[in-house]
Image (spheres, coloured by chain):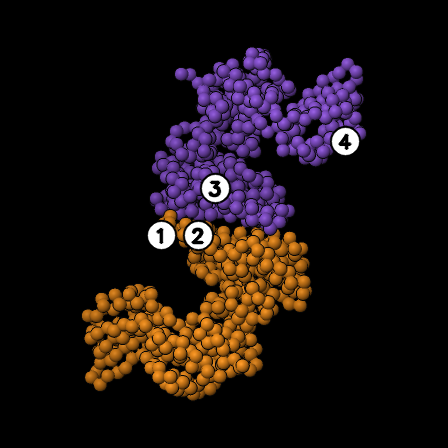
Chain colours: A purple, B orange
Amino acid sequence: MARIVMKFGGTSVADLDRIRNVANRVKREVDAGNEVAVVVSAMSGTTNQLVKWCTELSPLHDAREYDVVVATGEQVTIGLLAIALQTIGVNARSWQGWQIAIRTDDAHGKARVEEIDGAALIERMQQGQVPVVAGFQGIGPDNRVTTLGRGGSDLSAVAIAAAVKADRCDIYTDVDGVYTTDPRIVPKARKLPAVAYEEMLELASVGAKVLQTRSVELAMKQRVRVQVLSSFEDKPGSMVVDEDEIVEQPLVTGVAYSRDEAKVTLRRVPDKPGIAAEVFVPLSAANVNVDMIVQNLGADGTTDMTFTVGKTDLPRAKEVLEKARAIIQYEAMITDPDVAKISIVGIGMRSHAGVAATMFKALSEKGINIQVISTSEIKTSVLVGLEYTELAVRALHTAYGLDAEG
Amino acid sequence: MARIVMKFGGTSVADLDRIRNVANRVKREVDAGNEVAVVVSAMSGTTNQLVKWCTELSPLHDAREYDVVVATGEQVTIGLLAIALQTIGVNARSWQGWQIAIRTDDAHGKARVEEIDGAALIERMQQGQVPVVAGFQGIGPDNRVTTLGRGGSDLSAVAIAAAVKADRCDIYTDVDGVYTTDPRIVPKARKLPAVAYEEMLELASVGAKVLQTRSVELAMKQRVRVQVLSSFEDKPGSMVVDEDEIVEQPLVTGVAYSRDEAKVTLRRVPDKPGIAAEVFVPLSAANVNVDMIVQNLGADGTTDMTFTVGKTDLPRAKEVLEKARAIIQYEAMITDPDVAKISIVGIGMRSHAGVAATMFKALSEKGINIQVISTSEIKTSVLVGLEYTELAVRALHTAYGLDAEG
């Protein structure tokens, strides 16, 4: 017997048959004696259509009205799922963001959840009713509908789970868990029974996008135990939990990769104090996110600066840096979009030195040149040529003993 | 300078181009110095799709969840229209039923408006903002979304007009006003510059369905001046107002017809007290509405009872009456679906006797047999053979001097 929040994404509620399927899954948890609340997204495709209408009317549409329009997608799903549940004998009632209420700030289109009153939901659950909650939406300080940004339904689910003090938040999705790496690249990738919040954050931010990053941050902050599992298969998924819950902690939990970055090198920049600010402040002002940074001091008082930016930001970055050339005084700018970032992630790295050495050795053995290295407490990333992506991921997966047996 | 509520139906907001067209119409009223609020329906087709989903999941779906689902149609339109208005420089803000709030009873799916707080809307209008209000929806006593039933957006518009003390409620539709009769039958039909509430009610209930009946009743009760006009053409429509406002009152304002009734005759019913109850109570219990009723007393202590029911209710009516045959003791039941009800309507009839005589004479001259007659204060209706519908309408339109000149 437990209190569970179940979250179903857009593909899981894409049509009436799938909504019926979701209703059956919910009924099973209810029949097992659990107290259940459900959070759902819009039927897949719906949100895109609504966004398209807003954008066609005006590319610079009012975010407040955009929120009014797109929030309808989830409203349709909660009503339909409540009907589907009632039809198979489950006591259910739909809840919109303003009814609960899910209070957010007024950053329309990407609002942050500030407070959720869980009292009404808890009361209903204790009475045996299943609250069916609209994901992705809340209510702002001026009583206007807000939305939480793309993938916001994961965030809603975690926030609701915290508000009702749920034992577990089950996120049903189209993958069946969190893997040691992308199974499309490494057939021997293993599903992780458990992964720590911090690891999940690093795995998400480097490309293994199973859960929306903000929802993992919130789960970590509120200590919500999250399970990622398949809405189409019937087997346990991966738990995302506090590291203390993970009994046998490997040094490296997973290998992630990202093909979304591009490399920028500024040659022979005068090595004077404040030069980094001259490079990175205008980039930041132009909304260009800079990720990995290395600086190689030359013998002649100049330095080569290399860093990565999002691939889609590259044209903007080049424009900004060309304009700033007179100030920065670099000799040449070289850009390369054909790079990949490969990362090993594991909270075990915190307490064990030398973990990265295995990485460098494994890549070297395959003849893969490392262009940039960056490290954090539980992650080491390297930048390599784009064509080496799969080779590098496979080599590291084997080197850290992550391959499945047999 | 006036305070106006403008209402646009589903066909007027069917796509983005039409929504832009509506925005331009609103802007024109704003530019003319008026204070404007807008009420809109769902984009045409949307509500049908949403209803279909609910029905497919369960024919006996919970009306509360049905309301959650179908209310989204109007929510999409208000957001999109607000964006369209802002895009052409009109200060606009969308309002859902619960935000205003439009308080209703809890009769989900066909709720009645109980109270509207107009204060917030009036304040915004006085500040030069255009409230864009979702028609068809409200909020019930338990803070759950309600809908007002089909055609409910007309009702919303009139109720909002009353709440904000509007000078006028303009209902934009796909006809350009209220006519003396159906122009498809009588090319010489004239658009009425003004029609009294009572007349509009009679015209609506006998088939000229320009405005939803409940919205006319509400307008009459709250003394809201309503204008019916075309959303596709640019000319004045018909005012629906208090009869005192109508300066030159003709005896007969219009000729209406309905092909939706069927005739039922019970032959040789024993003429005893309570016999009418024995016939009509079971019909009412089976939800069969009875309209015109006549009773002809025979010489032998029996009577022939003739009445009309909705054509779609005829099978049900027959079944009920066959079951009750032993109690009613009629000799035979004769039914005829091939009838039409033709009505002349005019508040002038109240003070002038003999108006109906012209009707009987005109029909007789065309050789049209009158099967049933019923009268009310401002209406006289006759039942004739279905094939005489057009002939009868044209004859009466001419006889009462309603034909347009030239």
Residue type for callout 3:
Ser
Residue type for callout 2:
Gln
Left/right of residue B242 with respect to residue B314 in the rendered view? right
Q: Position of residue A97 (x, y in %)?
A: 52, 45
Quarter occupied by the C terminus of chain B: bottom right
- CB-based contact (under 8 Å), mark 2 and mark 3: no
Instruction: Provide the residue designation for mark 1.
Output: B59
Instruction: Provide the residue designation for mark 4.
Output: A324
Please tell me which residue is depicted at 44% across the width and 85% down the height of the picture.
B355
Label 2 and label 3: CA atoms lie apart by 16 Å
Label 4 and label 1: CA atoms lie apart by 67 Å
Front label number (3 vs 1): 3
Residue type for callout 1:
Pro
Q: Secondary structure at mark 1?
A: loop
Instruction: Provide the residue designation for mark 2.
Output: B49
Instruction: Provide the residue designation for mark 3.
Output: A44
Residue type for callout 4:
Ala
Callout 1 crowding tier (Cα within 10 Å): few <14, some 14–19, many ≥20: few
Examine the image and state in which quarter residue A1 appears: top left
Callout 2 crowding tier (Cα within 10 Å): few <14, some 14–19, many ≥20: few
Q: For mark 2, name the chain.
A: B
